[in-house]
Image (cartoon, grey):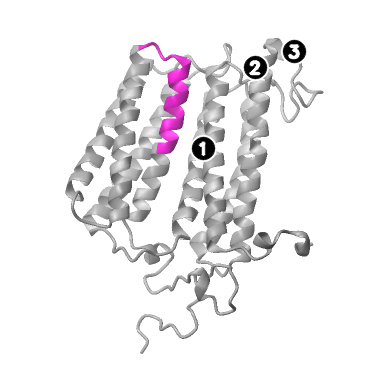
Amino acid sequence: MASLLPSWLRSPSRRHLRGAALAALIANIVIVFTGGLVRVTGSGLGCSDWPTCDGSNITPIAGGGGHAAWQGYVEFGNRLLSVPVLLTAVLVWWIVRRTGPHPRVVRRLALLLPLGVVGQIVLGGVTVLTGLSPVTVAGHFLASMVLIAAAAGIYELVREPDGDPAAARGVQHAMTAILVVSMVVLFLGTLVTGTGPHGGDLNAPRFGFNLRVMAIAHADAVWLLVGLTTATVAVTWRSGPSRFRRTLQLLLVVQLAQGGLGYLQYWLGVPPTLVSFHIVGATVMWTIAVLAWARARDHRSLLGGGDQHVLTDQQRPDGGEAADLDRPASGATTAGST
C-alpha cells in the first residue's frame, strides 16, 4: 500500500513535516474564521441536525429549519471544511511516524491533532443538537485554540536549529505570563460573545451575564496583556534571540490592532463584519503568542533536554531525506562525552 504513495510521503523530510504542520495551522485558523461567519450570519442552525443536515438530507435544502437556503450552505460549508482540517492533521501524524524517532513532545502533539479534530467534529454536532448552547460554542472555539497551539508547536519544534541562545530567565517567565493572560483573554472573549447578540441563531440561548460588565472585564484583561507585552518588548528591544524579538514585536502590533478593533466594534454596536475580523484576529494573536513563548526558550530544551541532538536532513546516517529529531548523528558526541 505504501508503494502507491508519492515519494515525498514514503520518505518525507523535515521540510515536508514543517509544511504539513503549517498547513494544519492554517486550516484550523480558516475553520475558526468560517465558524465565526456561521455565528454572525445567524446560520448556526441552517443545518438543524447532525450528522445529516435536517434528519434525512446530507446537504441543505431551501427553507430547511425555517432558514434561507444560503444559511444552510454557510453552515454546511463550515462542516465540509472539517475534511481538509482532518486531512492535514492526519498528514502531520503520518509524517511524524515516517520521520522518527522524534522526541515525546512532538509525537504527542502529532497524535493530539487528528484526535482533537475528530473530537471537534463530535463537539460541533453536540453544539447543533443543543441548539447552539453558548457553553458548547465556547468550548468549540477554545478547543480550536488547543489544536492551533499544537500545530504551531510542531511547526516550531521541527525547524532547523538556528543557534540562537535562550532569552533571559526573567523574559521566559514573562512570556509564560503573557501566554496565560492570553488564555484568560480568549476565555473572557467567549463569555462576551456568548452574552452578546451574535449567537448563531435568533433563538439560540445566551449567557445570563451583563454584556457591559463582561465587555469591561474582557477589556481589562486585554489592557493587562498589552501592558505585559509592551514591558517585555522594551526589555528585549536590543537584547535576546533575534527570532524571538521579531515575533514578540509582531505580537504587540497584533494585540494593539485587536484592542482597537474590539473598542471599535463595541462603539458601533457589534456589527457582524467587525466581529468576524475580531475572531480571526484573536486566533492569529494566540498563534503568535505560542510561537513567541517557544522562541524565548532554547530550541533543544523544548525537545525534552538540552543534550538532545537534532539532525538536519543531510545528517541522516542512512543518507535518506527523512528528518531525525532525536537520534545523534553518526560520529557526533553527546553532551558530557569525550
Dot 3 lies on which element?
A: loop
Q: Residue furthest bottom?
A: 338
Q: Please report whichever mark, 2 or 1, sits nearer to the chain's N-terminal start.
A: 1
- Residue 274: within the magenta? yes
Which quarter of the figure is the C terminus placed in? bottom left
- Vertical position of residue 175 compared to residue 42: above or below: below
Q: Distance between the residues labelled 2 and 1?
A: 21 Å
Q: Left of 65 or right of it: where is 188?
A: left
Q: x and y percent of residue 116 in the render? A: 59, 45
Pick the residue in front: 10 or 57.
10
Q: How far apart are marks 2 and 3 (CA)?
A: 9 Å
Identify which amino acid the numbered label 2 is placed on: Gln
Say which residue appears at 29% left-offset and 64% top-offset. 165
- Magenta range: 268-284
Q: Is residue 212 magenta?
A: no
Counting residues from the start of the chain, the first of labels 2 and 3 encountered is: 3
- Calculate the distance from the C-alpha at mark 3 to the C-alpha at mark 1: 29 Å
Above or below for 257 versus 17: above
Name the element at disc 1: helix
Q: Which mark is residue 29?
A: 1
**Magenta segment main secondary structure:** helix
Quickly name the residue at label 3: 62
What residue is shown with label 2?
71
Q: Residue at x 65, y 19 (%)?
A: 45
Tell me the amino acid under the disc marked 3: Ala
